[in-house]
Amino acid sequence: MIFAPGARKTGTEGQKLQAIDGFLRRFFIVFCKSENCLSEGGFSIEMTLLFIYNINSETIFHSTNKFLERKGEIDMIYSTEVKNMCSVHQGVHHGAAPIPEEAKWVSAKDVKDISGYTHGIGWCAPQQGACKLSLNVKDGIIQEALVETIGCSGMTHSAAMASEILPGLTVLEALNTDLVCDAINTAMRELFLQIVYGRTQSAFSEEGLQIGAGLEDLGKGARSMVGTTYGTLAKGPRYLELTDGYITELAIDENDEIIGYKFVNFGKMMDFIKKGDEPAEALKKASGKYGRVDDAVKFIDPRKE
């Protein structure tokens, strides 16, 4: 019988159980297409209802334990206190709250229900470096990974390995995979929290973002947006690199305050060189200025002066 041996009775009780057992067997045969999914004293079957027969109240309860994945026979061990408890029906159960995913409201119950493009920021234990991790996930599978690190030389090589490891994994696998660097692992943890709660960049974008969104984040030249500045109480601030690019000179006014800067965008410079421009010409074309540069009374090299 499908019911546990302890539930078998004789007489009227036994007849009730036998009738219910026959019904359930017919149900499972239709559902499984064979009796291979049935086993003596219990059943190992996916996506089914667990029927519990309560002898005292002579009531059949339909529990909400769906999607049971049982490989072989699993013998649950219950404490004496639990064994002696009477069965109480689980009443209110509304299921998973829907989250926004690619312009759809999804009640996520499995890894394959997760989709979206989002980011996570992580740091290592001594907080000497940080990582920005961006993943594009479709049906639970990571299709695209952008790993950006700063502050530690070893992290760049860790990022190189992580970019090979991540694509093709499920978000759950990635969460439990060593991504070489603590900062990247932490970023994966933070990203996981974002994506499973529906806080993604593509939450309200139909069909989500295309594969390649990570490169679009980098912009022309495919370089990370990095800001590097330095300052001391004695000598003041120095701008070294901003979104515009590598700072070559700072524009200083009569009060010795920064009013602008000159820069060179290395991404654009390399693109010009790849197209055949001479390095000197490429450097000139990739250079620019920002601020009141024309009003400066002097220029300084922020790395030397």
Image (cartoon, rainbow, N blue to C red):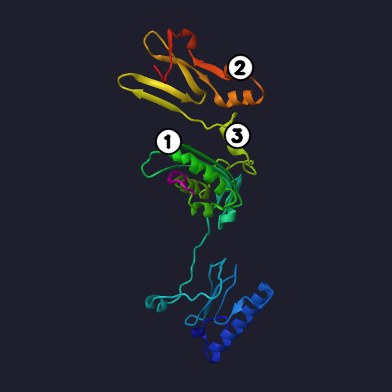
Query: Residue 9: horizontal and vertical position, in percent?
Result: 52, 88
Label located before the other in sequence (1 or 3): 1
- Callout 1, which amino acid? Gly
Q: Position of residue 160 (x, y in %)?
A: 53, 42
Residue 180 in the magenta stretch? The answer is yes
- Which residue is at a point 38% across and 14% down the rendered structure image? 257
The residue indicated by pointer 3 is 216
Q: Could you say which is closer to the camera, residue 123 or residue 46?
A: 123
Disc 2 packing (10 Å; few <14; some 14–19; many ≥20): few
Residue lying farthest to the left in this orientation: 234
Q: Which residues fall within the magenta stretch?
A: 179-184
Q: In this view of the protein, which residue sits in the foreground, 159 or 56? A: 159
Whichever of callouts 3 and 2 sits on the residue coming sooner in the sequence is 3
Q: Earlier in the sequence, mark 2 or mark 1?
A: 1
Callout in the foreground (3, 2): 2
Badge 2 element:
helix
On the image, the x and y values in percent for residue 233 come to 30, 22
Name the residue nearer the viewer: 98 or 30.
30
Estimate the spatial distance between the alpha carbons at disc 2 and disc 1, rounded to whole Å.
32 Å
Distance CA(mark 1)–CA(mark 3): 23 Å
Residue to which mark 2 is pinned: 281
- Outermost residue toward the bottom in this view: 11
Please, what is the three-letter code of the amino acid marked with disc 2? Glu
Q: Is residue 99 left or right of residue 83?
A: right
Decide if residue 110 is on the left or right side of residue 130: right
Query: SS at mark 3?
Result: helix
Quadrant containing the N terminus in the rendered view: bottom right
- Determine which residue is flagged by label 1: 151
Rendered view: 205 above or below 22: above
Image quadrant where residue 298 sits: top left
